Image (cartoon, rainbow, N blue to C red):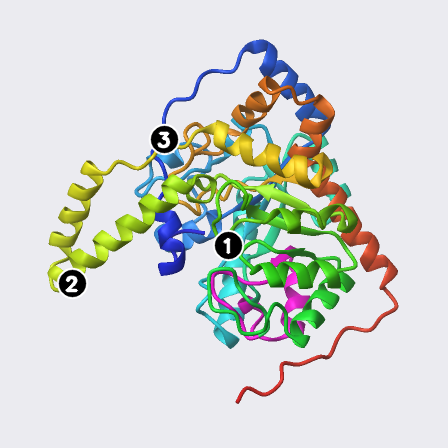
């Protein structure tokens, strides 16, 4: 998710500058490679399709290597995915959460088209996968299995028919909200309207279960999380969130919700967004937004004066650095509370303007695994984190869909809005 609107701008502005990470020893790298040869490293969230739409005319060419030299630079290309040992990727087909109705459906189709064109443009690297078993087969063939994720319930335009068609086009999860509360689900960064999920929202979850589409609870309110976990017959995921206990950010997941994951089978995929990882970065971001508002009030007709003032403020108030240890802290906390069977990785690359030191591009994943090795993680638990857990969740969703195969498609509709 790129800098999309004011709610997310706080976190986006809060991100740390990158730095050269310490090299991984050959012995540790060999261990990581052995693990990732057996189990694909599957990232839950990458925003390349939106970055291409916003800044590169939705053109998918030129991503073999060197995308970091684009204007603006990108965090992802094929060479860096390979260097990062990525074996599977969920490509987000995000659209702005303020877009609703028929326009949301049309724009989502355009983003799905971009993702399909991206995958087709690099057949030596990427292959479309529609099931967990296909993801594994693609990885064994030496390519990166690719699935799609819808990043906001607004994208179905209130239509379960649209949801079904998005599934047929390859979407294997849907985030129930983005930053904005929808007409059927409360977001974590907006005013609640439903105390979680509305009756139609519960019907959405049921239809996702029937299809075999994972319910993604990143972005949603705590009440929506609890409602969805209670309602879902299949494992849920959080495609890109961190833990509330280490940073009380509304995009993070509290311990009481983490404790619900074992019974559900769900997975929290930890993200690399510094503002979600470190409360000092979040505080810095809020202060920066306050300074920006002050400058805009003082110079309402001069963008140049505002930019110059912000640059001076940033020079005097450096962004707090965030490194791989902070991500590992969140991973370990989630594993302690929910268990090692319920953690994964969802970096949110190309949805953020800066990243964690050493994890600010698609080649950085081994650094996180190396840090966890340093902390004593076993090969089995590293494999679960890397991709084993999300594969299990996918298979759980597929089994639920098979069990519900005889049930007809839901014809539920949103109640008329007053």
- Rendered location of residue 103, percent (x, y): 48, 73
How many angstroms separate mark 2 from mark 1 (CA)? 39 Å
Q: Is residue 297 magenta?
A: no
- Rendered location of residue 2, percent (x, y): 41, 51
Q: Is residue 176 magenta?
A: yes
The kind of secondary structure element at disc 2 is helix
State which region is magenta. 154-183
Marks 2 & 3, CB-CB < 8 Å contact: no
Q: Which residue is mark 1?
A: 114
How many angstroms separate mark 2 from mark 3 (CA)? 32 Å
At a point 66% along the width and 26% down the height, the residue shown is 36
Give the class, few, some or many, for how many residues have Cα within 10 Å of label 1's Cα (few <14, many ≥20): many
Left or right position of 116 against 142:
left
Instruction: Identify the mark at residue 18; answer none if there is no mark.
Output: 3
- Rendered location of residue 265, percent (x, y): 76, 47
Q: Which residue is mark 2?
A: 297
């Amino acid at each position: 998710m790129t800098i999309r609107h004011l709610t997310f701008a706080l976190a986006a502005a809060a991100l740390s500058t990158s730095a050269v990470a310490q090299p991984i020893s050959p012995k540790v790298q060999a261990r990581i490679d052995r693990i990732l040869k057996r189990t694909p490293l599957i990232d839950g969230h990458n925003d390349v399709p939106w970055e291409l739409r916003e800044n590169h005319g939705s053109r998918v060419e030129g991503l073999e290597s060197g995308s970091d030299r684009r204007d603006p630079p990108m965090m992802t290309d094929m060479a860096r995915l390979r260097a990062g040992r990525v074996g599977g990727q969920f490509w987000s087909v995000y659209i702005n959460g303020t877009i609703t109705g028929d326009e949301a459906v049309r724009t989502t189709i355009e983003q799905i088209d971009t993702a399909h064109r991206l995958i087709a443009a690099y057949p030596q690297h990427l292959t479309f996968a529609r099931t967990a078993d296909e993801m594994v087969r693609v990885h064994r063939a030496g390519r990166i299995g690719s699935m799609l994720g819808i990043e906001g319930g607004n994208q179905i335009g209130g239509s379960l028919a649209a949801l079904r068609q998005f599934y047929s086009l390859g979407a294997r999860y849907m985030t129930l909200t983005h930053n904005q509360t929808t007409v059927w689900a409360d977001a974590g960064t907006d005013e609640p309207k439903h105390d979680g999920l509305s009756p139609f929202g519960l019907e959405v979850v049921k239809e996702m279960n029937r299809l075999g589409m994972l319910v993604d609870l990143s972005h949603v309110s705590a009440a929506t999380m609890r409602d969805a976990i209670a309602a879902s017959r299949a494992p849920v995921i959080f495609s890109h969130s961190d833990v509330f206990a280490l940073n009380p950010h509304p995009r993070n997941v509290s311990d009481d919700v983490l404790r619900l994951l074992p019974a559900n089978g769900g997975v929290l995929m930890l993200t690399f967004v510094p503002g979600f990882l470190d409360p000092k970065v979040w505080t810095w971001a809020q202060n920066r937004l306050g300074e920006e508002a002050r400058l805009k009030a003082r110079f309402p007709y001069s963008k140049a004066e505002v930019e110059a003032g912000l640059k001076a403020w940033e020079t005097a108030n450096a962004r707090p650095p965030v490194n791989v240890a902070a991500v590992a802290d969140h991973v370990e906390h989630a594993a302690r509370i929910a268990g090692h069977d319920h953690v994964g990785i969802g970096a949110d690359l190309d949805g953020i303007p800066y990243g964690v030191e050493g994890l600010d591009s698609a080649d950085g994943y081994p650094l996180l695994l190396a840090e966890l090795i340093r902390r004593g993680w076993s090969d089995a638990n590293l494999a679960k984190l890397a991709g084993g857990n999300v594969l299990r969740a996918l298979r759980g969703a597929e089994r639920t869909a098979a069990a519900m195969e005889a049930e007809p498609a839901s014809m539920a509709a949103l109640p008329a809005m007053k």
